[in-house]
Amino acid sequence: MKTTAAILWEVNAPWSVEEIELDAPKAGEVLVKIAASGMCHSDEHLTTGDLPFALPIIGGHEGAGVVEAVGEGVSWLEVGDHVVFGFIPSCGRCPSCSTGHQNLCDLGALMGLGMQVTDGTSRHHVGDKDLTLMCMLGTFAKHTVVNEASCIKIEKDVPLEKACLLGCGVVTGWGSAVYAADVAPGDTVVVVGVGGIGANAIQGARLAGAKRIVAIDPVEFKREKAMEFGATHTASSMAEALPLLQDLTWGTMANKVIMTMGVGNGQMIGEAMALAAKRGRVVVTNIHPALEMGGANMSLLDLTLMEKQLVGSLFGSGNPRADIPKLLGLYREGQLDLDGLVTKTYKLEDINEGYQDMRDGKNIRGVLIY
């Protein structure tokens, strides 16, 4: 069949929206008509080369849609089912999945190749050229073929233009606070960067019972939005937040610091550690450039004398098959704000405008509506 997709042909180029040829799903795969896709900063990392995935590539990894066909052997999904894609597939059988760490499924090792899990080939083509897929999904397209391991079935009454955000940003941010940071009632929490992930780290910290949540972002609009999501205080930089935290905590500082800015820099780790209390934990969720080989600028003595912790988090250290339905339940009950995350919607043809708005700090999350 023919469909339309946004393709990145080379680094530092705009997205090219064009017609592609899409093969039928093979064994273990499904064809999905995508309703909406979040415009995550991680796809921007493709254009800058910070994520050196194979090109040409169809971008997008926050998607939701309706199953239109299933391949041989797919028994738990059928035509008409509504699904959210998990940006890391989960097989349910590898050591990580079987011990409750679906975010680290062994199939994730194939993400950079962008081909199908089952046979390492492509279902997406332009002429005789095979296309790869961001996170083996390619949600910047009106249709896609993906492996069933990437699909989480959801109830049909959930708005797909909101559900798509659960494929990455919501679970990643929420889990960074609730799981990776292990925020406890009464904690003082700092969230550095208020985009699609940081906004949900704030919501997660609030739901976990944080007493104070300090949101840090240089953009005033994002600091204002942070207060709507549950932040109690804001600052424009970590340097500005330092005396604020000293005053708020009588010098004990933050129990948890969660790094969710667009692109990380090892030189900022020292600043983050300085915001952390004794036994405080700094969680690094944001992407760092793949070729960043410079060391993190921090006092290693802090780790010993203050028992501070520096940990990483992928997909919020969560289990998407459990956490996506859980968070949709919180949305139904009015405890999780998905509506407020969507600053503006765009057509697929306007994808480059949407990413410029993200660069200009105008969006918490832009969403493509098909």
Image (spheres, grey):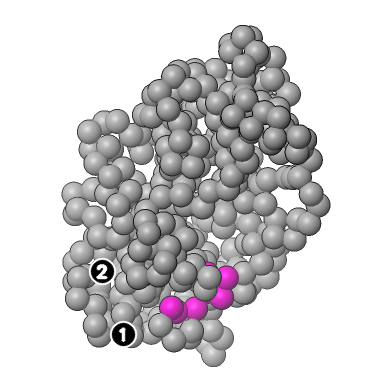
Point out residue 45 in the picture as x, y percentages from the top left corner: 63, 57
Is 305 left, or right, of 86 in this rendering?
right
Asked if residue 47 is positioned above or below residue 335 in the image, the reply reads below
- Residue drawn where x is 26% and y is 31% of the image: 334
Q: Secondary structure at mark 1?
A: loop
Q: Amino acid at mark 2?
A: Val
User: Which quarter of the figure has residue 255?
Assistant: top right
- Residue 53 within the magenta-colored segment of the rendering: no
| Magenta segment main secondary structure | loop
Q: CA distance from mark 2 to mark 1?
A: 15 Å
The stretch in magenta equals: 111-117
Viewer-nearest residue: 317 or 62: 317
Looking at the image, residue 39 lies above or below residue 135: above
Look at mark 2 in the image and give the residue it sits on. 67
What amino acid type is highlighted by mark number 1? Ala
Q: Position of residue 43 (x, y in %)?
A: 57, 57
Quarter the N terminus occupies: bottom left
Say the numbered circle drawn on residue 27.
1
Mark 2, Cα crowd under 10 Å, few <14 / some 14-19 / many 20+, is many
Q: Is residue 130 left or right of residue 48?
A: left
346 or 84: nearer the eye? 84
